[in-house]
């Protein structure tokens, strides 16, 4: 354990569902404020923070495809949901004095800046928290894969995968009381054991580029800086 951060530049992956808090849909104001405070505390550690947020609290592409919407179109709707979440988080961060910017892989310049690697890096070195919206900008890729891709592009030291449980388990601990938690895994082990905390493409991208993944619970205040300083319970997926 240390009070110093383990990594200097990270991608934090937040699910859209995490922003719902106790609600069943949309955005929960208290939860967003708590997440913003966590991200500000992380930036104050001197860590450069990029955030990739999902859209499942509004619309999930796979669910739309199940309802008869063409998959590519459903994924496009899901990308727009991530932009809504990113704009909400940007506002919450700025309200508490943390400079933030939304960059979207789906260009919508009247709302936010289009994503480019150069723009993202310029914001990071100015200690702005950047919200990376729109996934990869392409259908058929999850926001987990988007987080891994951005981590590779931006030369990040780790992907911080925020979940509702405190690491990776042998099975879903909410369904299987006998499930046990891994402290450390390799990327290859996570893929071989089909551990579905992230999709295979995300694990493979991080493996091929030597990027660790830290899986931790975001349910408690201070969870992100705690995981970054090794004080919180987490699973480390290491090369």
Image (spheres, rainbow, N blue to C red):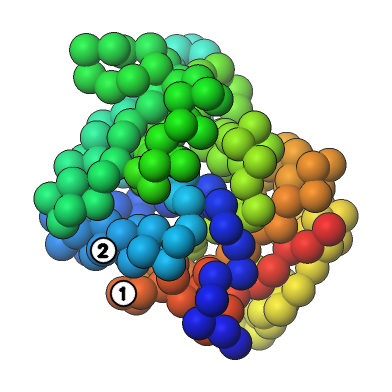
Res. 88 visible in picture: yes
The single residue placed furthest to the front in the displayed view is: 126
Q: Is 151 placed above or below 30 here?
A: above
Q: Position of residue 199 (x, y in %)?
A: 67, 44
Mark 1: secondary structure: loop
Q: Provide the residue designation for mark 2.
A: 37
Q: Position of residue 183 (x, y in %)?
A: 71, 78
Q: Earlier in the sequence, mark 2 or mark 1?
A: 2
How dense is the environment of label 2, judged by Cα within 10 Å: few (below 14), some, or many (20 and up)? many
The answer to which image quadrant residue 124 occupies is top left
Viewer-nearest of labels 2 and 1?
2
Relative vertical location of residue 214 with respect to residue 63 in this rendering, above or below: below
Q: Position of residue 80 (x, y in %)?
A: 34, 23
Q: Residue at x 78, y 62 (%)?
A: 238
From the viewer's perspective, tell me whether residue 169 is left or right of residue 44.
Answer: right
Report whether 54 appears left or right of 190: left
Q: Do the residues under discs 2 and 1 have CB atoms within 8 angstroms?
A: yes
SS at circle 2 = helix
Picture residue at 59% right of the left edge, 75% below the top: 234
The answer, for residue 15, to whether it is visible in the render is no
Residue that badge 1 annotates: 221
- Percent position (x, y) of residue 18? 35, 56
Q: CA distance from mark 2 to mark 1?
A: 8 Å
């Amino acid at each position: 354990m240390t009070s110093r951060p383990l990594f200097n530049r990270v991608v934090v992956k937040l699910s859209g569902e995490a922003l719902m808090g106790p609600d069943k849909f949309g955005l929960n104001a208290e939860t967003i404020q708590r997440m913003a405070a966590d991200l500000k505390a992380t930036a104050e550690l001197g860590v450069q923070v990029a955030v990739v947020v999902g859209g499942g609290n509004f619309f999930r592409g796979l669910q739309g495809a199940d309802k008869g919407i063409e998959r590519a179109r459903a994924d496009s709707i899901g990308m727009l949901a991530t932009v809504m979440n990113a704009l909400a988080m940007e506002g919450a961060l700025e309200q508490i004095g943390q400079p933030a910017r939304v960059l979207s892989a789906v260009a919508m310049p009247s709302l936010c800046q289009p994503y480019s690697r150069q723009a993202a890096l310029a914001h990071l070195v100015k200690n702005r928290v950047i919200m990376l919206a729109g996934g990869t900008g392409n259908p058929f890729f999850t926001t987990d894969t988007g987080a891994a891709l951005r981590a590779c592009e931006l030369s990040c030291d780790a992907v911080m995968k925020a979940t509702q449980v405190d690491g990776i388990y042998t099975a879903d601990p909410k369904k299987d009381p006998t499930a046990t938690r891994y402290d450390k895994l390799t990327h290859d082990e996570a893929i071989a054991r089909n551990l579905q905390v992230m999709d295979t493409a995300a694990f493979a991208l991080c493996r091929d580029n030597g990027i660790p993944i830290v899986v931790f619970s975001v349910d408690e205040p201070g969870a992100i800086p705690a995981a970054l300083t090794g004080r919180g319970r987490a699973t480390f997926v290491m090369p």
